[in-house]
């Protein structure tokens, strides 16, 4: 069966609730471990049915945000999912009180109880209406960005469609494209401010109703984080400031020198070489075909995985009008199918999708037989290790896509990953400030953003662009709206993926085997245990950070980038 044949049927909440509560009674009244275990399977089946429907809607809605059927279904899901989550938490509470806890732990591992405990901090009856509101606001943001239709070079383009022009070798075109993009954002600034303001206030209210001082601890619980908290993250941001910002600054200077520019302006940041950025040398079908060769050759596991994705048409890759922005990988449980969504636009980013999102998909594909659906995905700082490391494990095949541009690609990949870290940290610090001060005005938020931005990315120059000078840049970052506190996970994971990059240069097979082991463990352990399982060192340790930064910077220093 192909993706287009996967049937969507609305799960009516009333029926879902009746069925779920019945199963919950079975669980609570179970006279033996075996019967409780059966009740867990029944609950899992009911949950997966809802989850499958919700994912089919989310995917089909994001592929075409103008399709009114799936837009309505998305509204329906947005309105009932808080109550569904609340029922799930009832289940977790019952699990926590189980008289057979010892046996449950020996069968399923103790991580389910960590998730269960955290989940109870994220919802109760009193906040269901706020959660609905939050869902609606998220969807409103997604729709607003997807609605961008910006006249440029004789055509109306969406945000992804403008990107290739922002990487044009012609500085004038880059400037015009960037101005067009941020000009559109500026024209929507009031809407973007208002959506975010409502989101922040709604989240703050929810947190207070849940007994928290502000949304920060609730946000962490939603991310299912364990083993570290806001203090460790604050320390980690300091480490990035000390260890990475100087190198990133250096790399920006090298870029300016390569381009022969006195100093870089904001519209130069995504342009790397006067000979042009590395780009894939063929159309989407050609890219996918090489992707098949790559995954066939990488390992038997990746080969069967990628063929599964192709046979079932589980990828929607090319940018189209009305499509939501960005890229993601999700999982359709009842069909045991990962799904990859992206917006190919002819830049090197297209290949990153094929490696990054495929890394996520490969992990969930490898975790699909784990005994609990809670274990299909790990927490996201661990999940991003799978994706970011796959970007590195596939390096030996990059010549298939980039041909003569391959060396440029390598240099860009590593240096931009390094320069990403201070940006990711900026996003995180911003969110901590925002949620600690929920009454900040939109102007104050922009001011705060600009201050933090200058701290971590002091090279950012926006002269001539009032919107960006005044701190508007963050409004393009969907995570800030949709997934609070997610962003630092990319930074934590990148430090882990860099370690795989170092290790694969020493012993490729050992590194790959550890990677597969990590993928198979899914979400059955907390982040730092998974890191250890994969033979990696904690990214919170200063030595770890120092070591990867020095290894990468050593490599980058061996490259004469002025010749690229
Ligand atoms: Zn990812």
Image (spheres, rainbow, N blue to C red):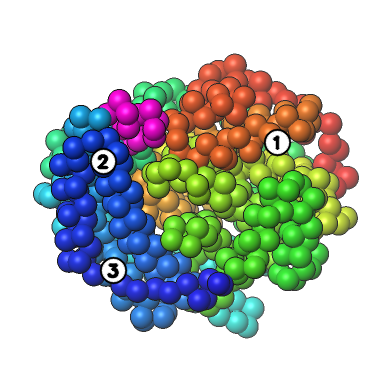
Element at label 2: helix
Predominant SS of the magenta segment: helix
Left or right of residue 403, residue 355 in this image: left
Residue drawn where x is 19% and y is 40% of the image:
30
Residue drawn where x is 29% and y is 39% of the image:
34
Relative image position of residue 432 (x, y in whole percent): 34, 36
- Residue 102 on the magenta span: yes
Residue drawn where x is 60% and y is 49% of the image:
362
Q: Which mark is residue 11?
A: 3
Q: Which of marks 3 and 2 is nearer the N terminus?
A: 3
Is mark 1 in CB contact (under 8 Å) with mark 3? no
Whether ligand 1 has any atom under 8 Å from the Cβ at mark 3 is answered as: no
Q: How many labels does the image show?
A: 3
Q: Nearer the viewer, mark 1 or mark 2?
A: 2
Q: Mark 2 points at which residue?
A: 36
Q: Which of 469 and 239 is in front in this view?
A: 239
Relative image position of residue 328 (x, y in whole percent): 52, 57
Is mark 3 in CB contact (under 8 Å) with mark 2? no
Disc 1 crowd rating (10 Å Cα; few below 14, some 14-19, many 20+) is many
Whether ligand 1 has any atom under 8 Å from the Cβ at mark 1 is answered as: no
Q: Which of 447 and 495 is in front in this view?
A: 495
Q: Nearer the viewer, residue 73 or 491?
A: 73
Left or right of residue 177, residue 282 in this image: right
- When the figure is inspected, residue 196 is found, relative to residue 414, above or below; the finding is below
Q: Mark 1 points at which residue?
A: 512
Q: Quadrant of the N terminus?
A: bottom right
Question: In 3D space, how far apart are the residues under numbered discs 3 and 2 (Cα atoms)?
Answer: 25 Å
- When the figure is inspected, residue 517 is found, relative to residue 538, above or below; the finding is below
């Amino acid at each position: 069966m192909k993706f287009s044949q996967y049937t969507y049927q609305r799960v009516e909440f009333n029926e879902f609730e009746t069925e779920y509560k019945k199963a919950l009674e079975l669980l609570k009244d179970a006279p033996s471990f075996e019967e409780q275990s059966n009740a867990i399977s029944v609950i899992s089946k009911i949950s997966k049915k809802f989850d499958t429907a919700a994912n089919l809607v989310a995917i089909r809605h994001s592929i075409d945000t103008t399709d009114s059927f799936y837009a309505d279904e998305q509204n329906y899901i947005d309105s009932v999912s808080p109550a569904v989550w609340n029922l799930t938490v009832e289940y977790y509470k019952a699990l926590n009180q189980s008289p057979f806890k010892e046996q449950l732990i020996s069968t399923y591992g103790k991580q389910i109880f960590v998730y269960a405990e955290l989940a109870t901090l994220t919802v109760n009856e009193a906040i269901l209406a706020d959660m609905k509101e939050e869902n609606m606001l998220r969807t409103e943001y997604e729709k607003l960005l997807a609605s961008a239709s910006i006249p440029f070079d004789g055509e109306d383009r969406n945000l992804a469609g403008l990107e290739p022009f922002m990487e044009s070798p012609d500085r004038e075109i880059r400037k015009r494209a960037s101005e067009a993009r941020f000009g559109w954002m500026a024209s929507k600034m009031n809407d973007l401010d208002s959506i975010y303001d409502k989101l922040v206030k709604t989240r703050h209210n929810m947190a207070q109703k849940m007994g928290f001082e502000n949304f920060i601890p609730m946000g962490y619980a939603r991310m299912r984080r364990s083993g570290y908290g806001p203090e460790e993250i604050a320390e980690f941001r300091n480490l990035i400031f000390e260890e990475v910002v100087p190198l990133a600054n250096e790399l920006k200077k090298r870029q300016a020198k390569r381009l022969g520019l006195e100093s870089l302006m904001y519209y130069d940041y995504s342009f790397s070489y006067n000979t042009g950025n590395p780009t894939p040398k063929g159309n989407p079908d050609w890219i996918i075909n090489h992707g098949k060769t790559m995954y066939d050759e990488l390992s038997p596991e990746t080969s069967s995985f990628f063929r599964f994705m192709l046979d079932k048409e589980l990828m929607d890759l090319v940018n189209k009008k009305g499509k939501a922005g960005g890229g993601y990988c999700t999982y359709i449980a009842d069909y045991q199918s990962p799904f990859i969504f992206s917006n190919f636009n002819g830049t090197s980013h297209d290949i990153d999708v094929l490696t990054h999102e495929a890394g996520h998909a490969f992990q969930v594909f490898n975790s699909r037989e784990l005994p609990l659906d809670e274990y299909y995905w790990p927490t996201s700082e661990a999940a991003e290790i799978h994706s970011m490391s796959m970007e590195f494990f596939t390096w030996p095949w990059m010549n298939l896509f980039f041909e003569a541009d391959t060396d440029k690609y390598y240099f860009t990949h590593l240096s931009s990953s390094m320069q990403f870290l201070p940006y990711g940290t900026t996003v995180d610090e911003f969110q901590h400030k925002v949620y600690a001060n929920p009454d900040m005005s939109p102007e104050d938020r922009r001011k705060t953003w600009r201050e933090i931005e200058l701290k971590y990315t002091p090279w950012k120059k926006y002269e001539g662009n009032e919107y960006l000078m005044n701190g508007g840049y963050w409004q393009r970052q969907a995570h800030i709206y949709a997934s609070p506190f997610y962003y630092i996970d990319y930074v934590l994971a990148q430090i882990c993926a860099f370690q795989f990059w170092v290790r694969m240069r020493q012993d490729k097979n050992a590194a790959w085997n550890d990677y597969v082991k990590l993928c198979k463990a899914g979400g059955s352990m907390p982040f730092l245990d998974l890191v250890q399982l994969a033979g990696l060192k904690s990214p919170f340790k200063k030595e770890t950070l120092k070591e990867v930064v020095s290894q990468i910077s050593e490599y980058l220093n061996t490259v004469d980038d002025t010749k690229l």
